[in-house]
Image: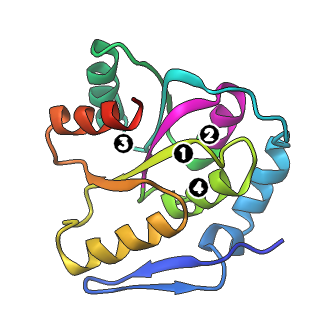
């Protein structure tokens, strides 16, 4: 089984290569085998949001905002942990950071969408590493949409703007 590609970015452009970096390093394959993700897809929890981000402070701020708006929230600090929680809880939405150690957001998105448990779950990608209005941000946005994410948002956006997007998506 080979993954379709990986994304490498410089300050001005992104390029796609043959396999995800984590797969090359063996991490994604180990995660996939260890999880033994089953093929049965239970109906997802309509009010449950999974935040996958290695930034604990941002996860906590986002969690408080979402919970105050009536959402249930579970958190993962890595792609691997996120995949484990996805398989166990089947959330309605995943908020997925792009830049994380070992298994980055693009690799995690690939594994989410490659498996029956996650293929229909909505995913929003997030970052604070670049401006999405610049060329690199536009390229990254195209790539994550191709892999199945709905859209990208910058972590510097107001929490109210992010919450409004989430409400529209989960209607």
Asked if the residue at tag 1 contacts the one at tag 4, i.e. Cβ–Cβ closer than 8 Å, the answer is no
Residue 143 placement: quadrant: bottom left
Q: State the separation of the CA atoms marked 1 and 3.
A: 10 Å
The relative height of residue 76 versus residue 13 in the rendered view (above or below) is: above
Residue at the image point whose x is 57% and y is 30% from the top: 91
Closer to the camera, 69 or 105?
69
Mark nearer the N terminus (4 vs 2): 2
Classify mark 1: helix, strand or loop.
loop
In the picture, the disc for residue 55 is 3
The image shows residue 94, relative to residue 147, as above or below, that is above
Q: Earlier in the sequence, mark 1 or mark 3?
A: 3
Whether pointer 1 and pointer 3 mark residues with C-beta atoms closer than 8 Å, the reply is: no
Does the magenta run of residues contain 55? no
Q: Quadrant of the N terminus?
A: bottom right
Question: In the rendered structure, which segment of residues is drawn in magenta?
Answer: 83-97
> Which residue has dot 1 on it?
78
> Label 4, label 1: how many angstroms apart (C-alpha)?
9 Å
Residues at circles 2 and 1 in contact by the CB criterion of under 8 Å = yes
Residue at disc 3, secondary structure: loop
Residue at image point 71% right, 60% down? 28
**Residue behind mark 4:** 108
What residue does disc 2 label?
81
């Amino acid at each position: 089984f080979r993954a379709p590609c990986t994304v490498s970015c410089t300050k001005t452009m992104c390029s796609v290569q043959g396999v995800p970096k984590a797969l090359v390093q063996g991490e994604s394959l180990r995660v996939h085998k260890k999880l033994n993700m089953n093929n049965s897809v239970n109906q997802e929890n309509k009010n449950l949001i999974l935040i996958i981000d290695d930034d604990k402070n941002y996860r906590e701020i986002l969690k408080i905002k979402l919970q105050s708006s009536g959402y249930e929230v579970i958190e993962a600090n890595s792609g691997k942990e996120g995949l484990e929680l996805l398989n166990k809880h089947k959330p309605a939405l995943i908020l997925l950071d792009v830049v994380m150690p070992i298994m980055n957001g693009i690799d995690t998105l690939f594994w989410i969408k490659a498996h029956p448990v996650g293929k229909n779950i909505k995913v929003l990608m997030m970052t604070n590493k670049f401006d999405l209005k610049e060329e690199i941000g536009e390229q990254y946005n195209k790539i994550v949409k191709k892999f199945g994410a709905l859209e990208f948002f910058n972590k510097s956006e107001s929490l109210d703007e992010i919450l409004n997007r989430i409400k529209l998506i989960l209607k």
